[in-house]
Image (spheres, helix red, strand yellow):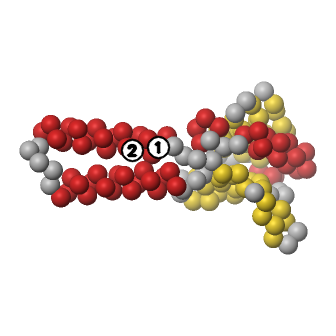
């Protein structure tokens, strides 16, 4: 998807989070099974807990992770807030089969995986080659 504001072009790639929602559904299923084995009947609070976990799983499934690549920055959502990394703050970009890793000068690596979050890594890899070339960033391909 291309977003153009004035002269700036931003490419936005979205994935799909499915591991955390599956874990939450597994957890609530286990909770229901164990609660039914120990309690005589479910009271209102147990049903509220079950509903809250299902809503939380749905929230994480529908809130899609993304990577936005601009002219001189990349942006993503980390720990429920948007994070921006300028080109000057990127040490290396590593492209491998199904995984894109951006290594900043300070902080933890940003990893975008086809397996983990269903990112279109082939499209992202071609855009990251352009980004690294335009901003003189070291690019490693494995």
97 on left or right of 135: left
Q: Residue at x 59, y 42 (%)?
A: 117
Total tally of numbered discs in the picture: 2
Q: Quadrant of residue 76?
A: bottom right
SS at mark 2 in the image: helix
* Residue identifier under label 2: 24
- Residue 69 in percent (x, y) is at 77, 54
Q: Are marks 2 and 1 in contact (CB under 8 Å)?
A: yes
Work out which quarter of the rendered image holds the C terminus and state it. Answer: top right
Work out how far the residue at label 2 is from the one at label 1, CA to CA, in angstroms: 6 Å
- Residue 26 in percent (x, y) is at 36, 39
Mark 2, other Cα within 10 Å: few <14 / some 14–19 / many ≥20 = some
123 on left or right of 65: right
- Residue 8 in percent (x, y) is at 84, 65
104 on left or right of 80: right
Image mark for residue 20: 1
Tell me if I can see residue 115 in this picture.
Answer: yes
The single residue placed furthest to the left in the displayed view is: 40
């Amino acid at each position: 998807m291309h977003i153009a504001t004035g002269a700036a072009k931003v490419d936005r790639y979205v994935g799909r989070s499915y591991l955390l929602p599956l874990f939450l559904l597994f957890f609530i299923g286990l909770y229901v099974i164990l609660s039914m084995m120990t309690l005589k009947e479910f009271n209102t609070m147990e049903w509220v807990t079950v509903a809250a976990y299902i809503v939380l799983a749905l929230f994480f499934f529908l809130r899609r992770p993304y990577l936005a690549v601009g002219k001189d920055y990349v942006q993503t959502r980390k720990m429920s807030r948007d994070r921006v990394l300028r080109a000057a703050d990127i040490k290396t970009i590593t492209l491998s089969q199904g995984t894109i890793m951006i290594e900043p000068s300070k902080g933890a690596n940003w990893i975008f995986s086809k397996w983990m979050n269903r990112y279109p890594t082939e499209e992202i890899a071609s855009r990251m080659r352009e980004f690294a070339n335009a901003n003189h960033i070291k690019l490693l391909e494995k």
